[in-house]
Image (cartoon, helix red, strand yellow):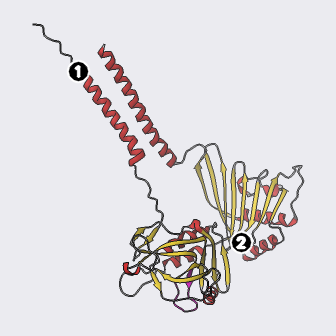
Amino acid sequence: MMKMKTKNRSPKFIALAVVCLLIGVGIGLVSYHYFLKPQSAVYEGLTQGHTSTHFQITKVGPTKEMIEKIVLLGNGKKEPIDPESEEGIGIASLLPRKLHELNLQAKCAFSKEEIQEIEQKDRSIRLFFKKPIDITISHWVEPEEGDHISVDERGYRILENVETALFILEDNLDEGLEAHVLVGHLIPPKMGSGHEKEWISYSCWAINIKEEGEPELDKSWIAEINSIIQRPKPIISVNSTVFEGERWMRLLNDGKVICYSDHYYPDYKEITIREGHISKEEIDAFLELFSNLSECSDYTVNVSEQLIGRDHMDCVFVPFGDAKISCIPLNKTLKLRLRPPSFPEPETITITAKEILKRIDDLYREAKITERKKEINPYHAKPFAVTIAYHEKALVVGAVAIIALMVGVMGFILKKRRR
């Protein structure tokens, strides 16, 4: 009796197992990278619960992008703050979050005249929104009270049609309003009510950080605002750009002078930091000089040999570069096209502008070097985060390529064995 020849199928099963394993690993890597990898949480709004340690997610609330205007008030003065400035960004980032945290309502009403007196005598900050908005705050409303009060799906109160908010920093009127927020609601006109035009009605709120007993108001945000407002502010800003680097200088209202310069080399960037001091009399002299210029003055100047200097890192102005000198309190800017001493292009600079140029150069040269360092040239090296992301993606692509190669090889081997 003839015995049938049994084929050894073990190599085929091993090959298939290896292929399945590699495919599984590849799918796992791709899935992790694109689906399971932890992502940063994005919230539409964040509000506080009854205390400063309980939070809930909400869909309604102001952000710094909604701020149209910021005004610092007090002592009979109104000081507008640019929302795009450093201090404006700091204020616009902090105070809208504090509106979310309001959880304690004060039972008081304010007339238009009383609001004006508070603005005149109390120290405060007023935010104006680009358009009236609804704000979900951290005041939870009892279900039986919710019939006539706007609340969200969780029972937290919604302040409707908020057009402005007045944050009290100092209560100079001694009315107990420190750390309170007067929220201005835009009320539409009603026939027969005495208000034929839109008007603003104020409600008074605060942040209670104590769960039981007498309320304890959160005043930490006042200290944060003061630290933002009281930071030294630039009076004169100088920016000079050249082909191989940039220079800038800031003259602050506290008399400090900060200078920065960098220079690119093939493999690195050299950075130099300088610091100096300017007297109040010198600041006043700059303000006087700028007061004689138009809002934006544009000139060509042939810089002298003395102004250029021998060391290119020792001067703020360089030939064939451009410079911009801004006087921030007066909102005036001096733009300069810098040329070598014997350049044929005629000068257009005025005597006043040339005096400003010389004073700036003197301050830069007098400033002492406080730091000098070298950094890898960014044109020759990717940032670390970009490099990591690049290698991570390369790993995924490489794994898929290896899997495809292995499948092809195994398919070829199995085909050969069948023959």
Q: Position of residue 233 (x, y in %)?
A: 65, 71
Q: Position of residue 285 (x, y in %)?
A: 79, 74
The reply to whether the magenta stretch includes residue 167 is yes
Along the line of sight, the residue nearer the viewer: 402 or 364: 402
Q: Is residue 320 above or below residue 223?
A: above
Mark 1, residues whose alpha carbon is within 10 Å: few (<14), some, or many (≥20)?
A: few
**Mark nearer the N terminus (1 vs 2):** 1
The three-letter code of the residue at mark 2 reads Ile
Residue 75 drawn in magenta: no
Q: Which mark is residue 176?
A: none
Query: Which residue is painted at 61% across and 67% down in the image?
Result: 86
Name the residue: 78% across, 55% down: 308
In the rendered view, does 105 fall on the left or right side of 290?
left
**Quadrant in which residue 164 is drawn:** bottom right
- The answer to whether one can see residue 45 in this image is yes
Secondary structure beneath dot 2 equals loop
Query: Residue 133 location, x and y as percent?
Result: 55, 71
Residue range of the region highlighted in magenta in the rendering? 166-179
Can you identify the residue that label 1 sits on?
9
**Picture layout, residue 88 above or below residue 200:** above
Mark 2 neighbour density, 10 Å: few (under 14) some (14–19) many (20 or more): some
Which x, y percent locates residue 53? 39, 73
Determine whether 40 is above or below 206 in the image.
above
Which secondary structure, mark 1? loop
Q: Where, quadrant-wise, is the C terminus in this rendering?
A: top left
Residue 224 at least partly seen: no
Per the rendering, the mark at residue 278 is: 2
- Helix, strand or loop: magenta stretch: loop
Q: Which residue occupies the foreground of this view, 244 or 144?
A: 144
Q: Residue furthest left?
A: 1
- Looking at the picture, which amino acid does disc 1 mark? Arg
